[in-house]
Amino acid sequence: MATEFVNKIHPEYPQMIYDALDALQQKEGSNKSSISKYIESKYGNMNDAHSKLLTYHLDRMKQTGELIFLKNNYIKPGPDAPPKRGRGRPPKPKTTLPQGTEIAAPKPRGRPKKDPNAPPTTKKPKPTSVPSDLAPVSTTGRPRGRPRKIRPQPPQNGLE
């Protein structure tokens, strides 16, 4: 069976993928399973490595820009489609500015630097701490903040 597969003449995988996309003629593209089914129907039973090879070639063609992967479908890029920006692709060409044009400095990021010529600031004195017994009581008569924890009294004489 392996010799039977080797003896069959198959085009290269990228060509088979292009043929499948042309034959399926779906506007929104074709997914991997429909491409695989078309290749198997046209070229007969493929070997066990067919799915791995198809996945490899689809990924490689997607990375090189030969195919566009959109919404789980593979599409051939159109002639008027702009080139895809991303990894492995050259940046946009920069336009040259007319001579004599001054470029403004970019806006600084982060916290502004301290002025070295500014006079030193004086620290505010901390108010003296007042013992909690003498702390001012609010107008309601209750002290401010969370009340202290009170340990429960153990029962006396075994009665509760």
Image (tube, helix red, strand yellow):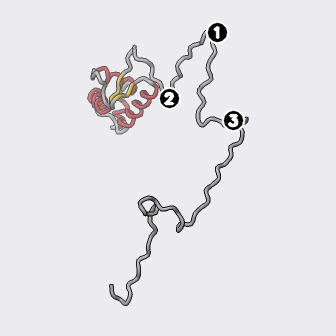
Q: What amino acid type is highlighted by mark number 3?
A: Asp
Q: Quadrant of the N terminus?
A: top left
**What's the distance in space between the residues labelled 3 and 2, CA to CA?**
42 Å
| Residue to which mark 1 is pinned | 99
Q: Quadrant of the C terminus?
A: bottom left
Q: Residue at x 67, y 37 (%)?
A: 114
Q: What amino acid type is highlighted by mark number 1?
A: Gln
Taking 102 as reference, is 63 above or below it? below
| Residue to which mark 3 is pinned | 115
- Mark 1 and 3 residues: CB-CB less than 8 Å, in contact? no
Q: Relative to 89, is 67 on the left or the right?
A: left
Counting residues from the N terminus, which is met first, the one under dot 3 or under dot 2?
2
Tell which tag, 3 or 2, sits nearer the viewer. 3
- Mark 2 and 1 residues: CB-CB less than 8 Å, in contact? no
Taking 160 as reference, is 70 above or below it? above
Query: Around disc 1, counting alpha carbons within 10 Å, would you say few (fewer than 14), some (14 to 19), or many (20 or more)?
Result: few
| Residue to which mark 2 is pinned | 87
Taking 127 as reference, is 66 above or below it? above
**What's the distance in space between the residues labelled 1 and 3, CA to CA?**
36 Å
Q: Residue at x 38, y 87 (%)?
A: 156
